[in-house]
Amino acid sequence: MTDVPVAATDHTVVLPCLMHDLAEAAAPEKIQLARSWLRSQERAMAEVFLEEGRRELPVDGDYTDWRQAQQRRLGEARERWLRTLADAGCNAVGAGGRSLAYVRPDLLDEYDSSHPENPADLPFTAPVTASQSVWWCCLRDESHQWRTSFYNRHVAGTGCPRCGKKGVSRREQEIFTALRERLPDLLSPGSVPRHERPQAGRRLRSWRVDMLLPGTPPVAVEYDGAYWHKDAFRKDQEKAADLMASGHIVIRVREQPLPTITPHDIVCTPDQPADAVAELVYRKIVEVTPELVPESSDDPEPTEGDPIAALPDDTPAPGTADKDVRSQVQRIALNALVMEALLQSQTMSVNNDLALGKHLVCGRPAADVRTVLRQDMGGLLALIHAAHRILGPTQPDTGAVGAATRRPWLGSS
């Protein structure tokens, strides 16, 4: 995907004219010119988003992440637009021009509007640099709630303290989550005192290890991404040596093309599934510490009372062929409906962002924003009803669409 729309960043032509017009205009005209230019930028970005939706919209379960990435791009573009206007001498573009909802729409769904301590209208009235602490709710796990300010979210870039630890990549977190299902005592991150004795006047900080399994002996697991560790071989080697000197078993997951460091290292590819990497780490831990983690058999032996359990009957039952044909037709129809529903959801979200921008910058009534959203939802509901007719009594899974279109600030219809 392109980072920004071409029509919205042709500064060689647009900016000189804009700055000249702003310099010549009176104060009320400056505001009108600024709002008109902002609307043109919003429309250009919307056209890019809709075209990308028709061409690149994912249907493999990553829609929410894709949608969040688009929202982040929209917020970054809005930040640049407002900075451009400020440089041109126009700051009064509306009460909500510097709000969290306008500059960082990707964070809007995480603002816990249902929390009694959170003002419902704060994302639309307070600047994105506000220092007031408010409550947030993680989109990945609603049980993850924390308190911090708009400033920390926007400027410092903080996120969920449980899902987005500082210095922890998403891939590392996914591997830890998958591995902890097998090893409940696993910690992330872990702290290990250095074995090397400090020299006079020199204090050595403890090692921070990506994952730590306490026990006798303890196991330290490190994930080394190729990008961040391409020039850190000597440092990684020294850390592994010091950890082993203090009695730890060290397992480093080295991403290709990084060379291995310890005898227990595991080599993986950047696109290898996290659960597959976690399984390799688990088997290595079982191999080097059999007394610490007894391996359980996933394929138990059949008992005497069930001698043919391992030999399933593949003979199709009467009428199965007809059911398979009907099921195949249903799958084709449902796949088409899912794609149409995601496209409609994307269109609805883009139109809602445009209406939101007019509300925050130009003072368009909030009721108009809700009207736009309800109108677009009509097409989405029609697709859902069509899926109901295909599935019969079975309820379709519309979680991806629901998560992508959730807007707690809209209130009840």
Image (tube, helix red, strand yellow):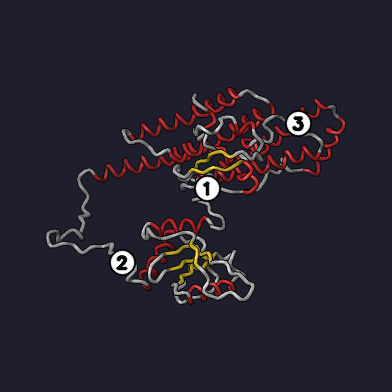
Dot 1 falls on a residue whose secondary structure is loop
Direction from residue 321 to residue 60 in the image, left or right: right
Q: Nearer the viewer, residue 115 or 50?
A: 115
Q: CA distance from mark 1 to mark 3?
A: 33 Å
C-alpha span from label 2 to label 3: 66 Å
Q: Nearer the viewer, mark 2 or mark 1?
A: 1
Residue located 36% across and 40% down the image: 330
Asked if 212 appears above or below 247 in the picture, the reply is above
- Mark 2 is surrounded, within 10 Å at the Cα level, by few (under 14), some (14 to 19) or many (20 or more) other residues, namely few
Q: Amino acid at mark 2?
A: Glu
**Residue 39 vs residue 113, the one in the foreground:** 113
- Give percent across and percent down for residue 154: 63, 44
> Eyeballing the image, is 262 above or below 360?
below
Quadrant of res 295? bottom left
Tag 2–tag 3 contact (CB < 8 Å): no
The residue sitting at the front extreme is: 200
Mark 3 — residue?
92
Instruction: Identify which residue is drawn at 60% across, 24% down.
Output: 366
State how far apart marks 2 and 1 are (Cα): 34 Å
User: Quick one: label 2 or label 3, which is nearer the N terminus?
Assistant: 3
Position of residue 65 measured from the top left corner of the image (x, y, whole percent)? 52, 46
Q: Which tag, 2 or 1, sits closer to the chain's start?
A: 1
* Residue occupied by mark 2: 295
Residue at 84 percent across and 33 percent down: it is: 21
